[in-house]
Amino acid sequence: MNIPSGLKLRHVEAFLAVASHGNISAAARARHVSQPALSKTVSDLEALLGVTLFERSGRRAVLTPAGETFRGHAQVALRSLEAAVDTFSGRASGGQVKVGVLPTVAGRFFPSVALEFSDSFEGTLVTVLTGPHSSLIEMLRSGKIDLMVGRMPVARDMPGLSFEFLYEEPILLVGRPDHPARNMSAPEALAHFPLILPNSGAIIRQNVNLYLSTLGLSDKKPRFETVAPPVALALLEKSDLLWFISRGVVEREVQSGALSCIELSSDYMTGAIGLTRKFKFDDNSPADRLARLLHRRAAELADGSR
């Protein structure tokens, strides 16, 4: 076996922490160790492997090509090891996790994580429920679901609950691929064409209202209100309507060219995506294992976007 005799699990975990956070200080805080100790662990790993894993640029630690290669193998190895430990500890089979999923993560992010979870814990049933944000919050409080994944709840919904950040997601303005507004500025397009807005109870509606207000369009009435893709996509296909919606809801259509985007150029037309759950939970429950996987996948996506 061509593995250095001094290579320990702590070396791999330290390396992945720095790769995820992008600097030694943040990784050290996350692992509850001192910065010098974590830096030495990474340096020891580089010495054991005989390669440079990070280039230091100010406070940043940027993966080298060798570091990128090692990260891919390390992530796979760590996931396999965790699955094996759960198997032999009796935690990998049986049980159920009930998840409330909002539209912004229902299209791609959550299904991909759920498949990985199901492959690792084959005996665990994953029950997925969808619905309005307010409804899922009540289901979470009453114990009908274990987790809710989607936009960060508003402050009034948070007592007794915790929000764990996963990633930032923008709000898009979209229309059919040959929409006459596709080469216009957003203010011009919004002034000339009818709108579909998110429902008044949707988390992103406040951002959209503020954006329209800054353009002097707060009095413009929408033709429709919805966050439901089947309805909105059918409306967009046959009209000059424009739709404000979270990227995750329409990412597939945007990437395939089935929808065109009008550039908004606004820093605040974005919001936090994460998981919401009660403060008290079982560290070894299926729900917590799924939560850890959601965090890991979000960190991998963030690394890939750098």
Image (cartoon, rainbow, N blue to C red):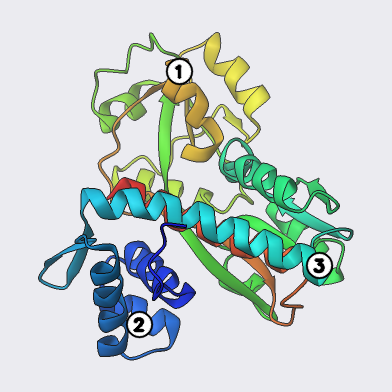
Closer to the observer: label 3 or label 2? 3
Secondary element type, mark 1: helix
Residue 274 position within the rendered picture, expressed as x and y whole percent measured from the top left = 55, 60
CB atoms of marks 3 and 2 within 8 Å: no
Tag 3: residue type?
Arg
Q: Earlier in the sequence, mark 3 or mark 2?
A: 2
Closer to viewer: mark 3 or mark 1: 3
Disc 2/disc 1 C-alpha distance (Å): 40 Å
Disc 3 to disc 1: CB gap under 8 Å: no
Residue 246 visible in this rendered orientation of the protein:
no
Mark 1 or mark 2, which is nearer the start of the sequence? Answer: 2
The image quarter in which residue 281 lies: bottom right
For this rendering, which residue is in front, 276 or 72?
72
User: Disc 2, disc 1: CB below 8 Å?
Assistant: no
Image coordinates for residue 25, horizontal then vertical, percent: 27, 80
Residue sitting at 58 percent across and 57 percent down? 79
Is residue 207 visible in the rendered structure shown here? yes
In this view of the protein, which residue sits in the foreground, 66 or 284? 66
Q: In the structure shown, which secondary structural element does the residue marked by tag 2 occupy?
A: helix
Q: Secondary structure at mark 3?
A: loop
Q: Earlier in the sequence, mark 3 or mark 1?
A: 3
- Which residue is under mark 1? 256
Residue indicated by mark 3: 91
Bin the neighbour count of mark 2 within 10 Å (Cα to Cα): few under 14, some 14-19, many 20 and up: many
Q: Choose between 279 and 231: the one closer to the eye.
A: 279
Judge left or right: residue 97 versus residue 119: right
- Circle number at residue 28: 2
Amino acid type, residue under disc 2 in the picture: Ala
Q: CA distance from mark 3 to mark 1?
A: 40 Å
265 sits to left or right of 275: left
